[in-house]
Structures are given as C-alpha cells and as structure tokens.
Image (spheres, grey):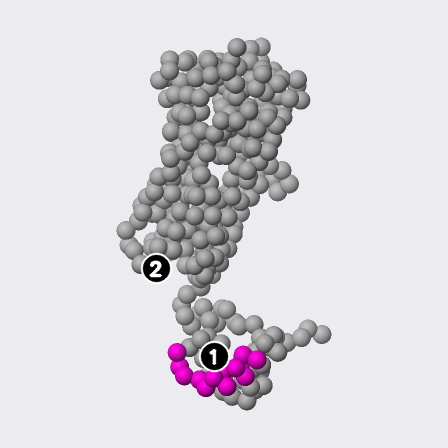
C-alpha cells in the first residue's frame, strides 16, 4: 500500500493551528506569528517529513527559480565543463537547472523548448543544433528569456560567443611557426556556426603565412549521428584518421575541430605505428580536462568553457533581476595551450 504524502493540512492539525498560519511560517511570510507557535509548526512539519508542494508555490509566486539548459550532447566533456559554470552561478543565486540533452536532433530540441516553456522556467541557456532558428525565436517572442552560447543564431537575443575565427587562426599560426607546411584539417560536418568560423580562421592563417591549403589533407565527414552508447567526435576522429592514412601522402601536422576528435585521431595514428608528434603533430580545440591527461598531452585552443558557462548564467540572471529589455552580446577571446602533441618539424 502506497503511503499518502503529508500535506499542509496534516501539519496544521498536528500543530493545532490554521492552514494559513502554517503557510505563513513555512513560507517565511512577513505576517506576524508568535515565536512559540512558529517553532511548533516547524517542529511538527519536521516530524511529519512534510515536503512543500513546489508547483503550488510556483503558481502562487509566479516564479519557478528554474533555468533550462539545452546542450547538443553530454558525451563531449566540453558541455559538462560548461554546465558546471552555469550551475555554480545558478546555485549561488538560489536557482536550479533543468538539463536537456538534444542528441544533436532539432526535433528533440524543439520538444525540450516546449517542455521548458510549459514548466514556466525563468529562462533558457542553449547551444542550438538548428540552422534556422524560427522556433527558438518564437519562444523568445512568447516571453522566455534566452541566452545562446557556443553557436550563433539569426535573431536578436543574448549571446555568449567565442572568437572562433581567431581560434582557428591561432592553431594554423602555431603549426606554421613550428615549420609545418603540409597541414591537414579533420572535422565533423561544417554545419554549425562554430565549425565554419574555426575553419575560416584556419584558412586565414594559412593564407597570411603563405602556406597553400592542400585539399588532399582536408577530411570533413558528410554526416553526424549521435548514439547513446558512443562518443561521436571521438569515433569520427578515428574514422577520418584512417581515411587519411589510406592516402599515399600524409601531412606533417593536423588541426582537429575539437579535442575529442583530436584524441580519436591520435589513438588511430598510434594504432598504425604513427608517432605523435614525432611523425605527425596534432592540435585540438576546446581544452577539455582530458586533453592534458592523454598521452601525449594535447596542444589545443582554450575557449574558456567553464568561464563561458558562468557568463551565460550571469547574463541570464542579470536580465531577470533587472528586467532588462536590451539584449547583451559578449565575446570571449581564445588562447593557445601548447603541450606535447606538437613539435618543431625537423
């Protein structure tokens, strides 16, 4: 037999007082209640393991204290690191986060947006997987305060954006300064703003230092599928590295679109007796925690993921608190982190 949950009526009966008085005590109301009675209410509530009805409280206060966070996938360490930044700021300000994993599927993303809207969250922080953002725009027009991170969107809203072009440029510049001229590029499909801009910056770097881009060294996958029991970026790096190894001529260095891809590339190269960085230098993008744990430790571009998460939450809470109508757009400058996976070419 399922035990009935304790209600506010049970607390009022046990404390021998009214429901209104119990409500005032439990909700820290300014309405005066005698100290002795207030202590008795709290004592009886504790004895009865009373849990407040948060939905009812939300309806009464017209405030949920919940923030929705929608990410493309949870398997890439980039996103958990970012969520930690969001959660720290949210928790310090009395907010909870509702995490949604879209699995890189626009349909899933739209379902989560609708669900979060129905739950009356205070706002949404999102890395959208959609190329056309009409549905996201509609939710913004319905009153949901939105902060976009990692990806750009085609309508005016709050944005935390990395200078991806600069990040791609830094990677190319680093490899060229090490003496590399045969430079490869490995990536998932260029169907996201971040990837397009990183690649743009990479090409800009090659051009500025008069290094020709050899199309035989460019490997970009045609499709992107997320599975619950696999890490897409890692597997994609391994697959594209094997494609590269099937060619008659190899680059002396490779820039990968993110760290998980780079780690997959390194492992595939090592399995085929290609030493990194002795035979091929490899550089990633993100600076996720595991990038310094792998062997060799990965040279990468740091986009300050944890900081990005904190900034996204701070912007959202600021506009909620101040009821700001004007949207904010903040840019984060990336930096190069040199480790063991790249070396001067001999």
Name the residue: 46% across, 34% down.
302
Residue 177: name its quadrant: top left
Give me the C-alpha separation between circle 2 and circle 1.
26 Å
Report which residue position mark 2 lands on.
321
Q: Which residues are magenta?
A: 30-43
Magenta-colored segment: predominant secondary structure: helix
Q: Nearer the viewer, residue 9 or 27?
A: 27
Residue extending farthest to the bottom is 16
Residue 24 image position (x, y, % from top left): 45, 80
Report which residue position mark 1 lands on.
25
The secondary structure type at the circle numbered 2 is: helix
Residue 30, compared with residue 296, is above or below; it is below
Residue 305 image position (x, y, % from top left): 46, 40
Residue 283 image position (x, y, % from top left): 51, 25
Residue 319: name its quadrant: bottom left
Is 288 displayed left or right of 133 in the figure?
right
Please give the count of numbered marks on the rendered protein: 2
């Amino acid at each position: 037999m399922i035990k009935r949950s304790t209600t506010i009526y049970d607390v009022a009966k046990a404390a021998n007082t009214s429901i209104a008085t119990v409500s005032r005590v439990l909700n820290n109301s300014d309405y005066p209640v005698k100290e002795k009675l207030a202590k008795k209410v709290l004592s009886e509530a504790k004895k009865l393991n009373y849990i407040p009805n948060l939905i009812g409280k939300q309806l009464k206060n017209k405030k949920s204290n919940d923030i929705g966070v929608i990410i493309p996938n949870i398997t890439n360490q980039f996103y958990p690191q970012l969520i930690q930044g969001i959660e720290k700021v949210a928790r310090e300000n009395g907010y909870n986060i509702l995490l949604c994993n879209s699995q890189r599927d626009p349909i899933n993303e739209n379902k989560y947006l609708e669900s979060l809207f129905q739950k009356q969250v205070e706002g949404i922080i999102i890395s959208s997987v959609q190329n056309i953002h009409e549905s996201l725009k509609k939710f913004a027009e319905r009153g949901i305060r939105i902060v976009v991170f990692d990806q750009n969107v085609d309508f005016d809203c709050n944005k935390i954006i990395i200078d991806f072009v600069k990040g791609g440029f830094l990677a190319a510049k680093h490899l060229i300064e090490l003496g590399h001229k045969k430079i490869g590029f490995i990536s998932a499909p260029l169907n996201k703003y971040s990837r397009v801009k990183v690649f743009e910056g990479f090409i800009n770097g090659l051009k500025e230092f008069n290094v020709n881009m050899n199309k035989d060294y460019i490997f970009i996958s045609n499709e992107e599928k997320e599975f619950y029991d696999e890490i897409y970026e890692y597997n994609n790096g391994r697959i594209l590295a094997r494609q590269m190894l099937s060619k008659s001529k190899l680059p002396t260095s490779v820039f990968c679109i993110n760290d998980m891809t780079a780690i997959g590339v390194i492992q595939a190269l090592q399995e085929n007796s290609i030493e990194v960085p002795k035979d091929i230098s490899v550089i990633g993008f993100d600076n996720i925690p595991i990038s310094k744990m792998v062997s060799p430790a990965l040279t990468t571009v740091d986009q300050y993921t944890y900081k990005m998460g904190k900034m996204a939450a701070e912007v959202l809470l600021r506009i909620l608190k101040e009821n700001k109508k004007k949207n904010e757009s903040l840019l984060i400058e990336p930096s190069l982190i040199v480790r063991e996976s790249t070396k001067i070419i001999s």
